[in-house]
Image (tube, rainbow, N blue to C red):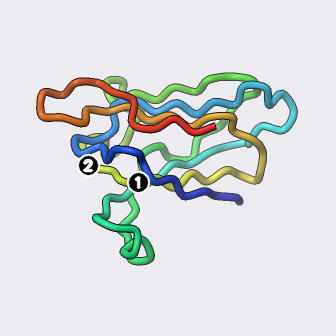
Amino acid sequence: QDWALLQLGTPAMHGVSRLILDTRHFKGNFPESVKVEGCFIDNSEELENAKWFPLVPRTRMGPDSEHVFTREKGQVEHAHHPVSHVRVSIYPDGGLSRVRLYGPTNIEGEQTIIRSLL
């Protein structure tokens, strides 16, 4: 299992409404499955003691595809919890071209992209 910690550019104070795991261009070296967890902390020094919760349970991936998970379809667990960091775990290994999280960042609930990583 490999994993990466990602700090969101803007914390998702009202949770994550949509998450995209992109395996585009990985036709033979895509991960068999991926798990995404989230946490909320005020500063990175607290990261060691963070309380992680699942956003997307371990889920099978396919080659060369965008895998979309939405709150509306019940595919994002703990969807209303604030999130400042995510931990993406891939099993056993393989490539993700992008991880995208979307969610409301203001009181009105306007949808904005939180972070897009290549």
At x 42%, y 48%, the residue is 8
Do labels 2 and 1 touch, CB within 8 Å?
Answer: yes
Q: Is mark 2 on a helix, strand or loop?
A: loop
How many C-alpha atoms fall within 10 Å of the one at disc 1: few (<14), some, or many (≥20)? many
Residue furthest to the right in view is 28
Q: Name the residue under label 1.
A: 38
Q: In this view, does 44 lie above or below 65?
A: below
Image point 31% across, 59% down: which residue?
A: 40
Q: Position of residue 105 (x, y in %)?
A: 25, 36
Image quadrant for the N terminus? Answer: bottom right
The kind of residue on which mark 2 rests is: His
Residue 14 got which mark? Answer: none
Q: Position of residue 112 (x, y in %)?
A: 33, 27
The location of residue 114, given as percent across then percent down, is: 39, 36
**Label 2: which residue?**
81
In the rendered view, tell whether residue 112 sits above or below residue 77.
above
Residue at the image position 80 percent from the left and 31 percent from the top: 26
Asked whether 42 or 59 is in front, the reply is 42
Quadrant of residue 73 in the image?
A: top left
In space, the residues marked 2 and 1 are separated at their CA atoms by 9 Å
Q: Count the marks.
A: 2
| Lateral position of residue 12 relative to residue 97, left or right | left
Crowd class of label 2 (few under 14; some 14 to 19; many from 20; radius 10 Å) = some
Q: Position of residue 32 (x, y in %)?
A: 73, 42
In the image, what residue type sits under mark 1? Answer: Gly
Relative vertical location of residue 44 with respect to residue 108 in this rendering, above or below: below
Nearer to me, 58 or 88: 88
Q: In which quarter of the image is residue 38?
A: bottom left
Side of 30 relative to 118 (left or right): right
